[in-house]
Image: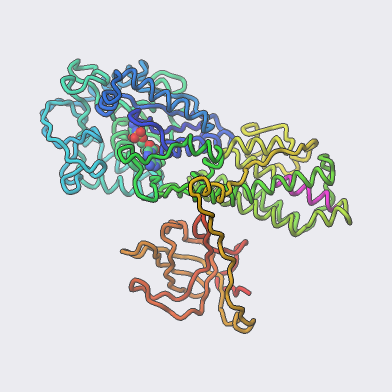
Amino acid sequence: MSKQFYITTPIYYVNAEPHIGHAYTTIVADVLNRFHMISPMETFFLTGTDEHGDKIVAAAEETGQSPKEYVDRISGMFKSLWPKLNISYDQFIRTTDLHHQETVRLILSRVKEKGDIYFSEYEGLYCLGCERFYTDRELVDGKCPDHQTEPEVIKEANYFFRMSNYQDWLIEHINQHPDFIRPERYRNEVLSFLSEPLEDLCISRPKSRLKWGITLPFDDDFVTYVWFDALINYVSALGYPEGDQFRKFWPSAQHVIAKDILKPHGIYWPCMLKSAGIEPYQHLNVHGYWNLSQGKMSKSLGNVVSPLELVDVYGLDAFRYFLLRDMVFGLDSSFSEEALVARLNADLANDLGNLVSRSLTMAQKYFEGDLPEPGPSREADEELKRSALELIDIYAGLIEDLALHKALMAIWEVIGKVNRYIDYMAPWVLAKSDRERLATVICHIFETLRIIAALLWPFIPGSAEKIQEQLGLSKKGTDFTLEEIKRWGMGRPVRTITKAPALFPRIEKEKKEQQSKPSAPKKKKAPGLPLISFEDFQKIDLRIGRIREAEAIPGSKKLIKLKIDIGEERTVVAGLKGHYAEEDLIGTEILLVANLAPVKLMGVESHGMLLAASDEAGLHLLVPDASTAPGSRVK
Ligand code: MSP
């Protein structure tokens, strides 16, 4: 594997202030970057702002500023936001930077010399919002699908890029590199687009209509189309063509974007690179959209969610954790503050925060912070050690596959195991009866915590470093490599441990509600169903099943049809849509009520029912805590 890693975010338009959508993409890039830092690789992380084009001129006019004053101000807002979200980028590029403008002109000249640019009169339907021409078949009811506005008919002479020359090459390249565009749904989208003849790309705007852009190197009366300008940032930032950084990092390039800009990145950009004689990027990583429960988030609807306001109320790492844990990379997610609070309280305050604080308290109380040598280990200790060590490779594999939410789930599985280990080992009893055993148990807890903290660092770097500090480790964050993390016993030199403030203070829902609503909050009623006899309970045939196939039922908002292996194949219809992605369900082990009378749901006969629990964070399938053969009876 290459020793370098180059990751980019889109360069954001400066016509709006940053919101959680921008924050999500940039945080994902930051996680991937930090993960590769500890892999360890030499990394380069690029972000920046896209500052030319009609949209920017219109936004500047609205504020009464010149385009230059305006772009300086908003670009500054993006630049100052990222450190507050603990984003450790290496370079912030602006398309108004001189060296970027020169690179755009150089690439345009190369593409022109190659014979891939021609001049022609064109009449087309132009959407100002998207800054591009639309074909009839791309419009929905004659309107732009993104802006719901009717495009203007514009007739003008312009320069065109012969994108069609590269259509066959691009199809071939995508077919030969299955993870060039990922996840698969976006690769398929691009291939489906490429199954129709590709139109050439209009790459200029006459200065009579737009002056705010980069002048074409071969015609002073035109500026460069904003996308042809913007995409080039990914190589201009590295000092293309002669820069050392370009030579070093470009071969490992990966872009992170959302689905809205798939076409420019999945089609225009590889064709532009090919024409300019530059190798294509390695991966285009495409994620879905954050929506609000009421629907799309947009500046015009005035419902954008500000990252800094959330960080102020809930803390940075609660915000980062929520975004990374609640979105399946590639699918859309719905944002709500309630869900964020639920995650913060359940996962961070309860599971992780309590684990750290109870462990520190025990080390303090029983050994005054001076951890002793462990004694001989027993099966339960070895089992915890195995889970912690196995986690490292599982985690790395999941991050490589962009399954960031699953990497967090895997860490939380081990957090759950340590919590259960503590409950089971009851160090407070050992403290009175067996000091050697107590030392062994405490050492296993701290070693596992050391691994957990190191693996959490890419996701929630600030809190992970705090934990590392509290564990008394001399190394923090990027000082650890994955190989070092694997060395069991490395964390033993923990010496002095001081009682620290809670890592993740709980958010009291009652308090929040009282602030907004004066009425008293409703308490959840304790569950109270009639008692049943043991004989009645035994009538339920509960089995372990493994999901083999999962397919959404057309026309249903909730239902997914599952094929489940319980020793035999069962078809079960479950209301899991919106909680789990179909592809994530495949392979999952579940608990099934296997002797429920069949029912027909949306025309599909369902033979059984999955067990799941729901709380404010959503619906959670109940799963066995270790792999269990399909069909095993649950007692
Ligand atoms: N300037 C272009 C990109 C040029 S890259 C060479 C642009 N800018 S943008 O400001 O509109 O940013 C779009 C990107 O912002 C999306 O691809 C995504 O990364 C992020 N998001 C904006 N809104 C989003 C959501 N609601 N949800 C998730 N991410 C979204 O397009």
Q: Quadrant of ligand 1?
A: top left
Give the residue displayed 47% in from the left and 31% down from the top: 6
Check the image and report above or below for 130 versus 611.
Answer: above
Location of the C terminus (image quadrant): bottom right
Give the residue displayed 70% in from the left and 35% down from the top: 469
Q: Is residue 125 visible?
A: yes
Q: Does 438 lie within the magenta span?
A: yes
Give the residue displayed 42% in from the left and 70% down from the top: 573
The spot of residue 498 in percent (x, y) is 77, 37
Q: Residue furthest bottom?
A: 535
Q: Nearer the viewer, residue 593 or 530?
A: 530
In the displayed structure image, the side of residue 266 where residue 137 appears, left or right: left
Q: Is residue 247 visible?
A: no
Q: Which residues are magenta?
A: 437-448
The spot of residue 383 in percent (x, y) is 71, 56
Q: How many marks?
A: 0
Q: Does 557 lie within the magenta span?
A: no
In the displayed structure image, the side of residue 58 where residue 504 appears, left or right: right
The spot of residue 413 in percent (x, y) is 61, 54
In the displayed structure image, the side of residue 395 where residue 196 appears, left or right: left
The spot of residue 444 in percent (x, y) is 75, 49
Q: What type of secondary structure mainly makes up the magenta span?
A: helix
Q: Nearer the viewer, residue 481 or 491?
A: 491
Check the image and report above or below for 252 versus 297.
Answer: above
Check the image and report above or below for 147 versus 156.
Answer: below
